[in-house]
Image (tube, rainbow, N blue to C red):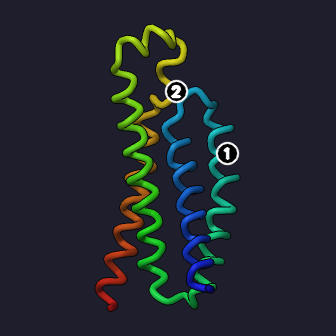
Amino acid sequence: MLKFLGTLLEVIAGFLLFVISLAAFMSKIPAGLKIIAMLIFLAPAALSMVLGLSLMGFRQWQRDIGIVLLSATGLTLFSVLSFGCIMMNDELRNLLGQSNLQPLDGYITGIAFNAALAALGWTQVKKCREVG
């Protein structure tokens, strides 16, 4: 039962990291407000991750953190790519109008943030493989 709750808390942490990663792509939000929103979601994500790891006795904690970071990054990039493909539809662009077409056009900050998360996740998984 503790492993299930620990895994559930890690999934919640991954979802919150996904929200943070997705917010990095949003350009219509002012930079200060974006950073505040990302920090607000980071606190419960970190708390959920630590609680999940503690319920599982911190066994293979580097692997778990790496998997959560890589999963959140992968889901974010898949979502942004899917949104970009959907926006290529001419009918949808005409229906939405020009003002609503680019909610996810902060590519520089989004890609940089997700690359940093992916690199951190990869190093955690790599460390776990070297130790184990």
Q: What element carries label 2?
A: loop
Which quarter of the figure has residue 78?
top left
The quarter of the picture where the N terminus appears is: bottom right
The quarter of the picture where the C terminus appears is: bottom left
Residue in the foreground of this view, choosing between 111 and 100: 100
Kindly report the distance in space between the C-alpha atoms of the residues bearing marks 1 and 2: 16 Å
Tag of residue 103: 2
Which quarter of the figure has residue 51?
bottom right
Residue 111 screen position, x and y as percent:
39, 44
The amino acid beneath tag 2 is Pro
Give the mark toward the camera: 1 or 2: 2
Q: Residue at x 45, y 49 (%)?
A: 113
Q: Residues within 10 Å of mark 2 (few under 14, many from 20)?
A: few
Residue in the foreground of this view, choosing between 90 and 38: 90
Position above or below: 26 against 94: below
The amino acid beneath tag 1 is Ala
Q: Residue at x 52, y 52 (%)?
A: 18
Q: Which residue is drawn at 57% across and 48% down?
A: 19
Position above or below: 112 against 130: above
The residue that mark 1 highlights is: 37
